[in-house]
Image: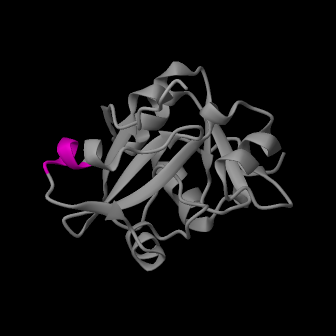
């Protein structure tokens, strides 16, 4: 385990106003860019990892929080937002909108104010783990608290999978 200063400086600065100065941030020598890498490093279930995914809805960046084992149903996101078109954001849009690179985007503490959607499935866990602004850092938090700090709307945007 490491000190909270191992988080990205922008994310660390965002913690104080939220009363999260003592947030436990873990740093790993190897990148935890993917949900599977993060789950393995932390020692938790894949569904306990929070993926922070940026999409563009009619050209506007939107953050979608999804568990690590699931995929986002883009059509459900489009319907939820009432948008004409929704697509994954390019890397430069992600960095511009959030201040972080893909693989390290936290659920809150962004450089710009984003609309945030969180899949309801995240609430199925006592604790979830999310990126702390870098591909090497994560933090644990109770899902309701995380979604409150992210000011996320709780929605159903998980892709249905065939049971076969």
Quadrant where the image shows the C terminus: top right
Above or below, 107 relative to 68:
below
Classify residue 17 as left or right of residue 141. Answer: left
x and y, in percent, of residue 8 in the image? 63, 64
- Give the residues drawn in magenta, as a range: 78-82
**Number of numbered tags placed on the structure image:** 0
Q: Provide residue 157's location: percent of width, then percent of height.
A: 35, 37
Q: Is residue 122 above or below residue 106?
A: above
Residue 122 in the image: above or below residue 96 = above
The x, y position of residue 33, in whole percent, is 68, 59
Specify the quadrant of the image occupied by residue 56.
Answer: bottom left
| Residue farthest to the bottom, as pictured | 92
User: Vertical placement of 126 versus 107: above or below?
Assistant: above
Is 33 positioned to the left or the right of 29 in the image?
left
> Residue 55 appears at what percent x and percent y?
35, 60
The foreground one among 29 and 160 is 160
Based on the displayed image, in which of its 4 quarters is residue 96 positioned? bottom left
The type of colouring in the image is: one colour
**Hey, which residue is sitting farthest front in the picture?**
164
Residue ID at (36%, 44%): 73
Q: Is residue 91 left or right of residue 118?
A: right
Q: Main secondary structure of the magenta part?
A: helix
Q: Residue at x 46, y 49 (%)?
A: 17
Q: Residue at x 49, y 51 (%)?
A: 52
Q: Is 80 in the magenta?
A: yes
Quadrant assignment, res 155: top left
Q: Is residue 163 magenta-colored?
A: no
Q: Quadrant of the N terminus?
A: top right
């Amino acid at each position: 385990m490491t000190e909270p200063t191992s988080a990205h400086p922008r994310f660390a600065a965002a913690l104080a106003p939220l009363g999260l100065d003592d947030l436990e941030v873990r740093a790993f020598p190897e990148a935890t860019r993917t949900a599977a890498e993060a789950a393995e490093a932390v020692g938790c279930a894949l569904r306990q990892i929070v993926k922070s995914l940026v999409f563009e809805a009619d050209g506007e960046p939107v953050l979608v929080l999804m568990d690590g084992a699931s995929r986002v149903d883009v059509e459900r996101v489009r319907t939820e937002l009432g948008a004409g078109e929704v697509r994954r954001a390019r890397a430069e849009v992600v960095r511009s909108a959030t201040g972080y690179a893909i693989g390290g985007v936290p659920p809150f503490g962004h450089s710009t104010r984003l609309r945030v959607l969180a899949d309801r499935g995240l609430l199925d866990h006592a604790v979830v783990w999310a990126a702390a602004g870098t591909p090497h850092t994560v933090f644990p938090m109770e899902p309701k608290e995380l979604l409150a700090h992210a000011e996320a709307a709780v929605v159903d945007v998980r892709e249905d999978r065939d049971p076969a």
